[in-house]
Image (cartoon, helix red, strand yellow):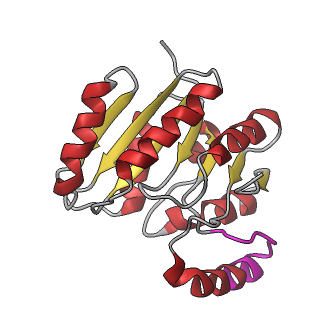
Amino acid sequence: MSKNLSVLIPVHEPSDELVAVHEETVAELETLGLEFEILYLLGTLASAPADQVRALQEKDPERVRVLQFGTTAGQSAVISAGFAEAEGEILITIPPCFEVEASALGRLVEAVQQRADLAFAPRGAREPGGGRLQSRLFNRIVSWAAGTEFSDVTTDTRAMRRRVMDEIPLYGEFHRYLPVLADRSGFNVEEVPAQE
């Protein structure tokens, strides 16, 4: 059966929050009434969380897939490979740790279904505290340089139409700047509040 949504979760290092992120993500997506899949993208250094991810796949083999990369690959390459494997019409990326509340996923999907080509949620209260000030300053500089008014262009929590990824090649560290790249390419990009 064709999927409406594909959620990609790159895992390059151990995360104590991985299982909780998975459970909250599934619970939120189930409220949407859409067919979805979750693709875990495991880098070669991710042997520790591989067991956790495989256990999640065993519990839900119809919706959870695991892509393991045999060579050291950068995150942009891993994400691009994940997009190529994804079945969904709407593609979602989230990190394996809590950056935003899972409820933001529903708002992102709604924005893409109704009007946006790409929607993203800025990191909020759940963002790890150590780098908040540095992150905000960096995002202001990037937004200013790009001519946008986005508050968090480097968030990993995004939803987009498949055609965005078909038209924007990712390499290097460009995955971090998808909202800016999409905006500069003429796509309708929307920043959705992380919390209601």
Vertically, is 163 above or below 34? below
Residue 174 as seen in the image, left or right of residue 105:
left
Residue 57 as seen in the image, left or right of residue 38:
left
Q: Residue 94, percent across and down?
A: 51, 51
Determine the image quadrant of residue 185. Answer: bottom right
Magenta-drawn stretch contains 142 = yes
The residue at 72%/82% (across/down) is 140
Residue 93 as seen in the image, left or right of residue 65:
right
Which one is in front, 98 or 13?
98
Segment colored magenta:
141-153
Vertically, is 27 above or below 41? above
Residue 86 as seen in the image, left or right of residue 71:
right
Which one is in front, 191 or 176?
191
Determine the image quadrant of residue 144. Answer: bottom right
Which one is in front, 195 or 13?
195
Q: Which residue, as the protein is rendered here, is positioned at the far top?
A: 1
Magenta-drawn stretch contains 42 = no
The residue at 59%/81% (across/down) is 132
The residue at 74%/72% (across/down) is 151
Total count of labels? 0
